[in-house]
Image (tube, rainbow, N blue to C red):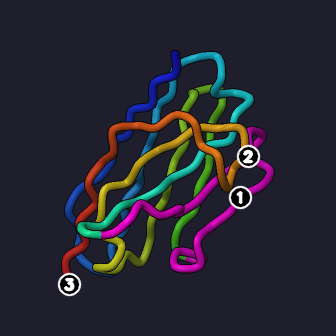
Amino acid sequence: QVQLVESGGGLVQAGGSLRLSCAASGRAFRTYAMGWFRQAPGKEREFVAGISWSGGRTYYADSVKGRFTISRDNAKITVYLQMNSLKPEDTGVYYCALGPDATTGYKYWGQGTQVTVSS
């Protein structure tokens, strides 16, 4: 059984920064890709960033390129999302996910953490 627990969300002013963390349990973590998704009120959940199991490949949505950085520490069984220059449109619930591919086909999901960016 794989469990994912996100933390680090909160309220921040536009232009500020937040760092999200996702702690995973289970043997699948070290060989699976990890990703972050978000869902704004009234909108569908969207891909934000993904990272390969080795950490050697990263992928980003165009809307966050240059502002967000995804990383992982397999020794700590944790994936991170550093979010800089935050904008009000970044507001939403952020979900951590785990699966065989860094861009699609995620199989396991966390419960989500709220990020609110005020203008």
**Kind of residue indicated by mark 3:** Ser
Amino acid on which disc 1 is placed = Thr
As measured in the structure, the alpha-carbon distance from the residue carrying label 2 to the one carrying label 1 is: 7 Å
Residue at the (20%, 84%) spot, across then down: 119
Front-lying residue, 69 or 28: 28
Q: Which residue is mark 2?
A: 52
* CB atoms of marks 3 and 1 within 8 Å: no
Determine which residue is flagged by label 3: 119
Residue under pointer 1: 58
Seen from the viewer's position, the closer of residues 3 and 16 is 3
In front: mark 3 or mark 2? Answer: 2
Q: Earlier in the sequence, mark 2 or mark 1?
A: 2
Find out whether residue 65 is within the magenta segment. yes
Rendered position, 78 above or below 46: above
Instruction: Inspect the image, locate mark 2, and give the three-letter code of the amino acid beneath it.
Output: Ser
Secondary element at image label 3: loop
For the point 52% across and 63% down, which residue is it? Answer: 48
- Calculate the distance from the C-alpha at mark 3 to the C-alpha at mark 2: 34 Å
Q: Position of residue 42 (x, y in %)?
A: 25, 69
